[in-house]
Amino acid sequence: MIGYARVSTSGQTLATQIEQLKAAGCTTVFQETASGARTDRPQLKKAIAALPYDGVLLVTRLDRLARSTRDLLNVVHQIEQAGGHFKSIAEAWADTTTPAGKLMLTVLGGLAEFERSLIKERTSEGRARAVKAGKRLGRRPLLTPAQQAEALRLAGEEKSHAEIGQVLRVSRSTISRFLAKTQG
């Protein structure tokens, strides 16, 4: 078994986690000080890479590994792709070495998928209501209506996009996109 211990800030200590992981039989413990929100945790990647086939990555608690259900499922998927298993000391149900543990994580995966679809549906409904109410969605235009008219006038005078951008104090690419949209 390989252990993974993580704290969020340098003011916290890894000692208790390391002690628990070694008492549970971990021969190696990868240690990290990083926010759980970060997906680029180098020590976690090293721990997964160090797992032998059928090896177990052990954590003291789920929150030391993942910040959300989706994050947990992603990390467990990476572990399984590497041929390993996952186990949490505090949450006995989070154990992919057993059929019951695999079932629990599968159920969690289904719930996470369901939650994502509900969020997507509510977001779509909200956007539709906003459009129906006449709200403009997205980023505000970089060019005011007066600047748009001036850009069209200058383009008619065969000015380059860079020259028009300088006059209007915007980038050449802003002018190029605007003219492509209106003239194309």
Image: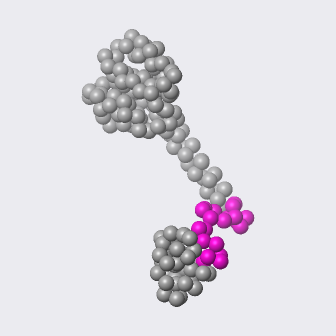
Instruction: Name the side, left or right, on which 77 lies relative to 158.
Output: left
Using the image, determine if residue 145 lies above or below residue 154: above
Which residue occupies the foreground of this view, 110 or 64?
64
Is residue 157 shown to the viewer in this render? yes
Q: Residue at x 30, y 25 (%)?
A: 55
Find residue 151 and report its image quarter. Answer: bottom right
48, above or below 148, in the image: above
Residue nearer the viewer, 20 or 106: 20
Q: Position of residue 163 (x, y in %)?
A: 49, 78
Which residue appears farthest toward the left when viewing the image?
A: 53
Question: 120 left or right of 81?
Answer: right
Check the image and name the residue furthest to the top. Answer: 23
Q: Is residue 48 visible?
A: no
- Provide the residue span drawn in magenta: 129-148
Q: Nearer the viewer, residue 79 or 103?
A: 79
Residue drawn at 39 percent across, 24 percent down: 31
| Coordinates of residue 49 in the picture (x, y in percent) | 30, 32
**Main SS class of the magenta portion in the image:** loop
Residue at the far bottom in the pictured view = 157
Q: Going 49% across and 32% down the picture, which residue do you hit?
A: 35
Tell me residue 171's x, y (percent): 50, 69
